Amino acid sequence: MDFGRLLTAMVTPFDGDLKIDWNQTAKLIDYLIDEQGSTGLVIAGTTGESPTLTDEEKLELFRFAVRQANGRAKIIAGTGSNDTAHSIHLSQEAEKLGVDAIMLVSPYYSRTSQDGLSAHFRAVASSVGLPIMIYNIPSRTGVNIEAKTMLALADIPNIVAVKESSGDLDQMSAILAGAPDGFKLYSGDDSLTLPALSIGAYGIVSVTSHLVGKLMNEMIDAHVSGQPERASKLHLRLSPMFKGMFFCPHRVPNPVPVKYAMKHRGIDCGGVRLPLVGVTPEEANFIDALVASYEG
């Protein structure tokens, strides 16, 4: 399955009571596909505040996204957790709802061994028929999926991609050098989109595509079509946004900045659930100015 090159890790819009706002969710899905050019949407991932969504909310989001997207973009359901049995259950339920694929984050907190990681992903993969994207983000999970482990998993027929958020281009290079034909590596860091593409990555699972997806598509297209100078210029144009959505002006946890910023796109994504908290006045002023610099 080809998920396309620009996937958006979608925020989950909330209303004033911090319940899912379905009207704004529909508006957001249409906007990301039709206006920003997302070829796929990751639903209920980290950016979607998966730690504070119930299973019932996640499944309803999967069902809703499949219906709203209506084939215009691939729907990738975030079904991974640190409990293998739970991950299997949620993945099987997501499959029944018609999602195109699932994304499995590496088991967090338990800090299992490489053998444990392998056994976890193999167990989930054998329980469903869906394509699987593995998500490696050691800064959040406490464990890195090493290249050797990832390459062994890549031989499993329905494990078709990895979202690499280690920030380690050497590790990405090792995976790309040894991966079977058809296996795709996606950068999980917006700022590494072009560097990762330059060593063979296929695309990006992005946060800032909520705001600058069109420009990111232009950058990707420039790289793919053999226009390195244009791709480089676009990368440099986008760099302040890539940094600013995570450091505004100091580190602010995702998805707090991007949810706030979406008001500039006419979509009210609401607040965030505890233990996350909203932006401060200083952060709000920074984000307002940053987003305004990309308008017009």
Image (cartoon, grey):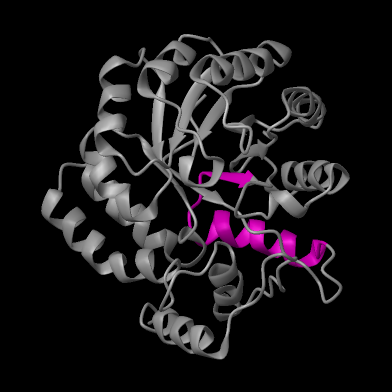
Across and down, in percent, residue 218 comes to 31, 55
In this picture, residue 188 sits left or right of residue 279: left
Marks counted in the figure total 0
Give the residue drawn at x 88%, y 44%. 56
Q: Quadrant of residue 75?
A: top right
Magenta-tinted stretch? 20-42
Q: Is residue 110 above or below residue 150?
A: below
Please check the rendered image and state whether residue 33 is part of the magenta-colored stretch, yes or no: yes
In this picture, residue 266 sits left or right of residue 172: right
Across and down, in percent, residue 93 comes to 82, 28
Q: Is residue 188 above or below residue 244?
A: above
Task: Look at the image and tell me in which quarter the C terminus lies.
Answer: bottom left
Give the residue drawn at x 46%, y 9%. 155
Observer-nearest residue: 269 or 6? 269
Across and down, in percent, residue 153 comes to 49, 14
Residue furthest to the left in view is 229
